[in-house]
Image (cartoon, helix red, strand yellow):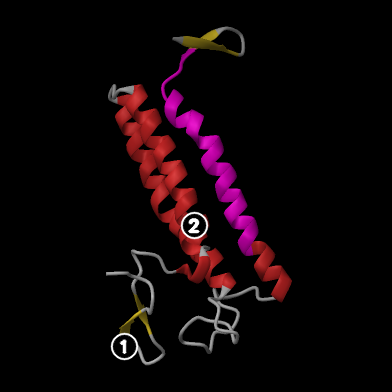
Amino acid sequence: MTSTLGIGVPVPKMLPITGTWTLPFAAYLVYLSNRVVYRRVKKEKYVGDRYDSDDPASQTSNGNPDPLLLDSRAHTNFLESVPLAFTLTAIAELNGANRKVLNYAMATLFVLRIMHVELGLKGKDTVGFGRPYVSGPSGITQRKSGSCKG
């Protein structure tokens, strides 16, 4: 399986799965980046990851989580995990891994990354089953009321 480059030089298609998934992941990264830029420009807060850096609980005055902190953490979290996944996928693909399994793995990662941000971090109260404890202003970890049933 090769294609031609320029004047007919054959070039093998070495990483079709990794290359295919680059566009959707890059598009979502641009979306996450634009969210952070929008928040910064809207409040003219060009440095830092919080609107109000004096607030130790990272919440705005009305008790809601700081939207700049949520957006910047979602962006950073994406950048921490996705490049490693792409590197491992490329290595597996170059070593002859099953392409169907790699496609399913990348699709699953893509859907879960979006769900993590849109339904997890940006969801109501931003506290789900995996986040039953929060740090209070004093630094003491306390149970978030109503986050876990049982």
- Horizontal side of 64 relative to 149 (left or right) equals right
Q: Position of residue 43 (x, y in %)?
A: 70, 75
Vertical arrangement, residue 60 with respect to residue 118, above or below: below
* Element on which disc 2 rests: helix
Residue depicted at 56% across the width and 36% down the height: 23
* Residue numbers of the magenta segment: 11-36
Residue depicted at 69% across the width and 63% down the height: 38
- The C terminus lies in which quarter of the figure? bottom left
Question: How many numbered marks appear?
Answer: 2
Residue 13 drawn in magenta: yes
Residue depicted at 55% across the width and 83% down the height: 63
Q: Which of 6/43 is in front?
A: 43
Q: Position of residue 3 (x, y in %)?
A: 52, 11
Q: Residue furthest front?
A: 150
Mark carried by residue 119: 2
Q: How crowded is the residue under tag 1: few (<14 C-alpha within 10 Å), some, or many (20+)?
A: few
Q: Which residue is mark 1?
A: 140
Dominant SS in magenta: helix
- The N terminus lies in which quarter of the figure? top left
Tag 2: amino acid: Leu
Vertical arrangement, residue 116 with respect to residue 96, above or below: below
Q: How crowded is the residue under tag 2: few (<14 C-alpha within 10 Å), some, or many (20+)?
A: some
Mark carried by residue 15: none
Residue depicted at 29% across the width and 24% down the height: 97
Tag 1: amino acid: Ile
Q: Which of 75/112 is in front?
A: 112
Residue 98 drawn in magenta: no
Q: Position of residue 56 (x, y in %)?
A: 46, 87
Vertical arrangement, residue 38 with respect to residue 48, above or below: above
